[in-house]
Amino acid sequence: MRVIIAEDSVLLREGIARLLTESGFNVVETVEDGETLIRRIADLAPDVAVIDIRMPPSHTDEGLRAAQHIRLHHADVGVLLLSQHAEVGIAMKLLEGGADGAGYLLKDRIADVEEFAAAVRRVGEGGSALDPAIVSQLVRRRRENDRLEILSTREREVLELIGEGLSNQAIAERLFVSQSAVEKHVSSIFDKLQIPGTKDTHRRVLAVLALLRH
Amino acid sequence: MAVRRATIYVAGLALLAGVTAAILTATRKHEELRAVGHPEAWAFVLLIGWSFIGSGIVAAARGLGPRFGALMIGAGFAWFAAALSASGEPVPFTIGMLLASLWIAIFVHALLAFPGGRLESHAARVVVGAYYFQAVVLQLGWLMFTNTTTLDGCHGCPMNLLLISDRPRLANAILFIEQPIVGVVALAGAVAILAHRWWAGTPPARRSLGPVLASGGACLIILALDILVEPLSYRGGQVIGWASVIAFSAVPFAFLLGLLRQRLDRSAVAQLVIELGDHAAQTNLQAALSRALRDPSVQIAYWLPDAGRYVDTEGRPVDPPAEHDAHRATTTVDHDGERVAILVHDPSLLEDPELVHGVCAAAGLALSNQRLQAQLRARLLELQQSRARIVEVGDAERRRLERDLHDGAQQRLVSLSLDLSSVGARVRDDPETAALVTAIRAELARSLEELRELAQGIHPAALTDHGLPVALETVATRCVIPCSLTVAIEGRLPVPVEVAIYYLVSEALANVAKHAGASRASISVARTNGSVRIEVTDDGVGGARVGTGSGLTGLADRIAALEGSLEVRSPLSGGTTVRAEIPCG
């Protein structure tokens, strides 16, 4: 899988590149700012871009704007935003047009190499990945006329892990239950939230959006 | 005294010249070339001359325009001099013929130079020069080649002493240049200049210019008609000639009307004294002075000697106009020998220094009192600004700290945990070391977590980086009860305003969570004209107030520093509304 990395800190840029290379990715390019990123994406057509949200010149939201641009003009390139802060508002902006091929993680997660690599791969394949810190805020968020109210406690837990982007097997491992039990919960969640039955990846993405918008 | 003596001499001379001119006109024997020269018109001869000289004397004696006054007096005497042509004696007759139209040149000069007495524009100098050329040079040329004893329409005229040779065709050629060409073209120029002055004039200037320019302009137009019609029809020429007589006798009266208007303005000073005496403290001084000076553009700038600058009534700094500003003039107001303020006003008021000084003297004490208020307001304003600066500097410092943490410690720790995970991969075979590495990684993760919270507490990075909607989304999401959020703001607000709104909403929601016992809350932030309105409401028990120890007290200070207002409405019957309004350009 072809990856491009945009990160202005040399330490992290090289660290992430090394880590992803070791995990079997093909790191085609590393850049330091959003503008170069957008230019190189057009030339290199990678599968996924790993983007730091704060980059030169203003060190504010360059990464987010570059990600939005890529999602609009290069829909087949997945974008994974990295940030020091977990902001629900940023997740909503990033996923405005749909949750497929998009992810938003705290930078801390890089250290968990396997999960990070899995998240990059998932986003590159058109899936989604939201940071647990965001997902837990969203699940805990209280709403009047809460659509999630109809879910059982266990189903909420499962939805949370779907939001993070985990597969059924990974969810089963995390919750110490059988995979068939997870599958049962997942289909119950899809039914209750009235998520139409198409491809499984797509339904999972729609579940993430339901979580965001509830 | 010199002025008064000069006035008496001029008046005496005018009396003499007028009577002479009237007698010569009334007793004339020969035919007259002009309309106002027939024996029965002696009273008009007297009236026009005296009214010119009289109004000139008044203008000069009142100090309104000594140059203008002199020109009017000159025009009056030139008018009487022209009446010498009624004499049957060759010497006075020749002088009268030579000076026949000099008065028109002087009159045009006075009109275009009103009220200062100086010709301000190049065009005006050209026009007036053309008139003098016509009145002196061309008239002399015509006389040198005209035998008045045989001239058509001058039956019984005495001998013209300037005659060199009798050449009627040459004389007619000169007359042709003199009248239609120079006369009409220069007249059109003069009318255009007057029209432009009226058009470009400020209201106070128009007020004093009005009557003079209107009647003067009318005279010029009638003169032009006279020149055009007379060669075609003798009767028509006579009619227009009489019309011009009436118009010319009106000009000095129009000028006197202008003076009278200024005298009426003077009574405004008395009105001002009464107004200030009764309700000095409540009076809007600027409006009162505008009324008294009949200049709506009057501005007061109070002088603050300590600060060495001027401020307006509200204490805001103002810059006095530049010394050579053509559109604004200033007058300094002193009280007890000390500069109190300057009045910034229309330059036309400088032409009536008596009125301005009268008004300044009347308002001196009131201005001195109101200066103290302006001074106090200026200090308050400074305090306000310094408070806002302190808050701003504090915020900037916190933002810098947050950024340093982000670029420094946080990046390093993330990078460190990355390295540590490669170490972990290498020591997989050594369970003891692997366990140690895992423990260190967990510890590092917690440190990062704590560092993130610390950074967030120092300064909300999302606010600076992504704006209010994103930052408030997180605040609302974390609220323990259902909380709706509406942010109706296009683009970004000034940084201090955004920060204040962020802290206000965070604090209000924290209070809702702690005390309100509410089941729902709502946040709304909306921009109205010139300010932002923030409202946080809940349906809790009510009874909250901004008091000591409440986090809202510090916020009230922060919002006050931005000249905003904070209001907490929390009746015991239930529900709390925290409402703030912050101006933002």
Image (tube, coloured by chain):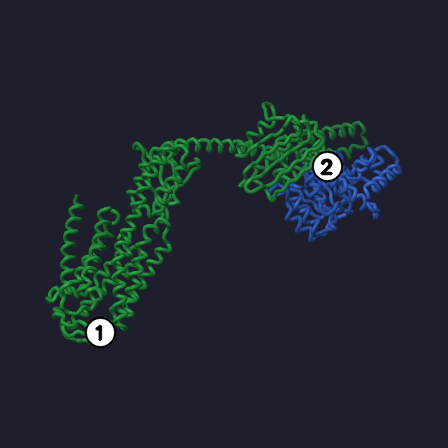
Chain colours: A blue, B green
Q: Left or right of B396: which side holds B176?
A: left
Q: Residue at x 36, y 57 (%)?
A: B196
Q: Kindly tell me whether residue A3 is visible in this rendering.
A: no
State the residue position of label 1. B172
Q: Chain of mark 2?
A: A
Same chain, labels 2 and 1: no
Label at residue B311: none
- Looking at this rendering, what residue extends furthest in the top direction? B548
Q: Left or right of B320: which side holds A102?
A: right
State the residue position of label 2. A134
Residue B59 locus on image (x, y percent): 24, 49
Amino acid marked by disc 2: Ile
**Local crowd at mark 1 within 10 Å, few (<14), some, or many (≥20)?**
some
Q: Residue at x 35, y 52 (%)?
A: B206
**Local crowd at mark 2 within 10 Å, few (<14), some, or many (≥20)?**
many
Q: Residue at x 26, y 47 (%)?
A: B64
From this view, report whether residue B117 is shown above or below residue B341: below
- Marks 2 and 1, Cα distance to the nearest angstrom? 105 Å
Q: Left or right of B96: which side holds B499?
A: right
